[in-house]
Image (tube, helix red, strand yellow):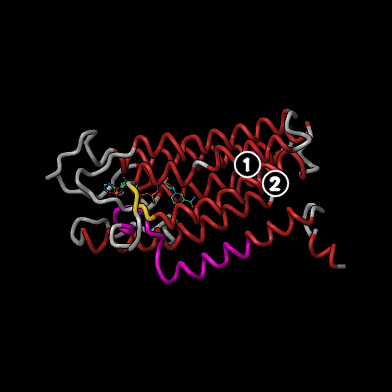
Amino acid sequence: MREMVMAWYTGNAVYDGLLAFGFLYALGIFISARFGTPAYGGRFGARSKGLKLGSKAGWVLMELPTLIAFPIFFFMGDRSEDTVALVLGGVWMFHYTNRALVNPLLMRVHPGSPPSFNINVVVIGWAVLVLHSYLNGSFISEHAAHLTEDWLNDPRFYIGAVVYAIGFTVNVWSDAILRKLRAPDPDPDAPRYKVPHGGLFKYVSCPQYLGELTSFLGFSIMTWGLGGIYILAVSAANLVPRARVTHRWYLRTFPDEYPKNRKAIIPFLY
Ligand SMILES: NC(=O)c1ccc[n+]([C@@H]2O[C@H](COP(=O)([O-])OP(=O)(O)OC[C@H]3O[C@@H](n4cnc5c(N)ncnc54)[C@H](OP(=O)(O)O)[C@@H]3O)[C@@H](O)[C@H]2O)c1
């Protein structure tokens, strides 16, 4: 009985125990997000206490485990050389090359802005992302019995791939709109923040988060695994409250200019 409880999903007690822990952790973030948003980004991190890094260094350092830990867990799996595993592993590496390297390195930092990426966020991020890397790397190449060659003809694979591609495109497009609010070499006297327009900013204040969550939903469908749902839950618990705080910040900071019909993260609804 005890073993059945421990091995409730894949049959592997270590995997299933860590997955259960991951969901409890997502619940914890959801509850704690009511008391504040993580201390990174100029609007949120600058006033927090403790050691802080610049945005670029903070993002690269925090996200790096996804490019190191995932391949380790992935290649430990018996089926790591199967086509389907390699395709899904490739999607992961593509996603996190953008998140850990491309997006941070393209970021345009406002001149003279103090470091705002709290080191605590980096350390907690490592724990979340190493678990994420294990839950997906090990699932794809070892525990997922359904990920055989036939999976590439399964509608769940195609539907997931389309949802993932839409989410990723919205995320990258929205990040680019935010980036271009600053010149490549920003003038220190120019305003640090502006009202973003274009793309899905027409409907919501944080389309970059909407895109991120949609891409994780797509990845979960593509892999048909709870490892994807774990990061979707953790990210939603973090990003939905953060979108709400950001939305209110825009309304407060640009009271006359900010479009009143925009929602926080879900068009027309929230
Ligand atoms: N999976 C997850 O749990 C998770 C969590 C967080 C973020 N993300 C993803 O990581 C990416 C960045 O996240 P983020 O948006 O929260 O980062 P952010 O640090 O708040 O903003 C990203 C960049 O845009 C600048 N910026 C933001 N709003 C601006 C405005 N109105 N005017 C001018 N510049 C502005 C920021 O400048 P300042 O640094 O000067 O503020 C920063 O350089 C997004 O794609 C997001 O989806 C994922």
Q: Is residue 204 magenta?
A: no
Say which mark, if any, is on residue 224: 2
Describe the element under mark 2 as helix, strand or loop.
loop
180 and 90: which one is in front?
A: 90
Residue that label 1 marks: 160
The magenta span reads: 23-45
Near-viewer residue (251 or 136) = 136
Q: Residue at the location (44% across, 61% down)?
A: 269
| Above or below for 106 versus 132 | above
Asked if marks 2 and 1 touch (Cβ < 8 Å), the reply is yes
Q: Residue at x 77, y 34 (%)?
A: 79
Residue sitting at the far left: 189
Residue count near mark 1 (Cα–Cα under 10 Å), binned few <14, some 14–19, many ≥20: many
Asked if ligand 1 lies within 8 A of label 1, the reply is no
Q: Is residue 26 above or below residue 188?
A: below
> What residue is drawn where x is 50% and y is 53%?
125
